[in-house]
């Protein structure tokens, strides 16, 4: 049996998925066989072709994304462990620690001390748009008897994302 349509034997990756929290250990155990197989598939271009085939079938694509998520979480944990090694001076082949400086900021209460000299409109413009719910709360606190001017609220562009939901085995999408 092939796993995910990627031409990977199910007994290699399927075992790791069944072992849940021990999946990393299982994957490390089968890693030499699996890595060699995936590398040869990638070099031959068949890994991309297999994914293209999976992407054509919504059910297979859903199964692939669900199972790939397991590996993503372990990859994240692996990167965190690599950072621990690097922070403690242990070299990790193929990786190096990269640091970046934090953002320089000035606390709002310190900005307020200079607001009259700088100018409140100029300061507010530099801060950018305020979330409507925050402004509504500030408005209600300062002017409880007045109606909030909803015409001031501007709605930005929305976005879409994919969210995993539970689906019964017999349900299909049309």
Image (cartoon, rainbow, N blue to C red):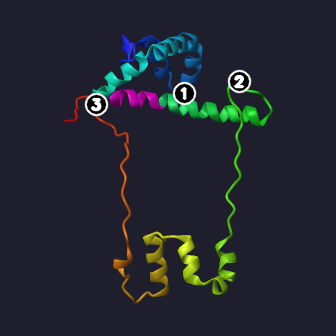
Residue farthest along the right direction in this orientation: 89
Q: Residue at x 35, y 27 (%)?
A: 63
User: Which residue, given by chain and number where applicable, does mark 2 sit on?
Assistant: 93
Tell me the mark number nearer the camera, choosing from 2 and 1.
2
Residue 162 against residue 148 in the figure, above or below: above
Taking the view exactly as shown, the residue that stands out farthest to the bottom is 145
Question: What type of secondary structure mainly makes up the magenta span?
Answer: helix
| Labelled pair 2, 1 in contact (Cβ < 8 Å) | no
| Image location of residue 151, percent across then percent down | 34, 78
What residue do we see at 69% from left, 82% from top?
A: 113
Q: Is residue 113 left or right of residue 48?
A: right
Q: Which corner quadrant of the image does residue 33 belong to?
A: top right
The magenta segment:
61-69
Q: Which quarter shows the N terminus?
A: top left
Closer-to-camera residue (105/76): 105
- The quarter in which the C terminus is drawn is top left
- Find residue 150 and report its horizontal and vertical position in percent: 35, 78
Q: Nearer the viewer, residue 68 or 43?
A: 43
Residue count near mark 2 (Cα–Cα under 10 Å), binned few <14, some 14–19, many ≥20:
few
- Looking at the image, residue 170 sits to the left or right of residue 165; the answer is left
Per the image, the residue denoted by label 3 is: 58
From the viewer's perspective, is the residue at label 3 or at label 2 nearer?
Answer: 2
Residue where numbered disc 1 is placed = 21
């Amino acid at each position: 049996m092939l796993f995910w349509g990627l031409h990977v034997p199910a007994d290699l990756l399927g075992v790791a998925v069944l072992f849940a929290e021990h999946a990393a250990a299982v994957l490390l155990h089968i890693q030499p066989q699996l890595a060699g197989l995936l590398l040869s598939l990638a070099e031959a271009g068949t890994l991309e072709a297999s994914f293209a085939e999976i992407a054509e079938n919504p059910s297979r694509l859903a199964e692939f994304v669900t199972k790939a998520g397991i590996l993503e979480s372990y990859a994240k944990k692996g990167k965190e462990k690599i950072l621990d090694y690097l922070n403690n001076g242990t070299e990790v082949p193929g990786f190096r620690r990269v640091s970046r400086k934090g953002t320089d900021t000035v606390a709002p209460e310190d900005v307020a001390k200079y607001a009259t000299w700088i100018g409140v409109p100029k300061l507010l413009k530099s801060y950018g748009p305020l979330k409507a719910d925050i402004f509504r709360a500030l408005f209600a606190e300062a002017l409880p008897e007045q109606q909030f001017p909803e015409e001031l609220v501007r709605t930005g562009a929305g976005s879409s994302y994919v969210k995993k939901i539970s689906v019964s085995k017999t349900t299909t999408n049309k």
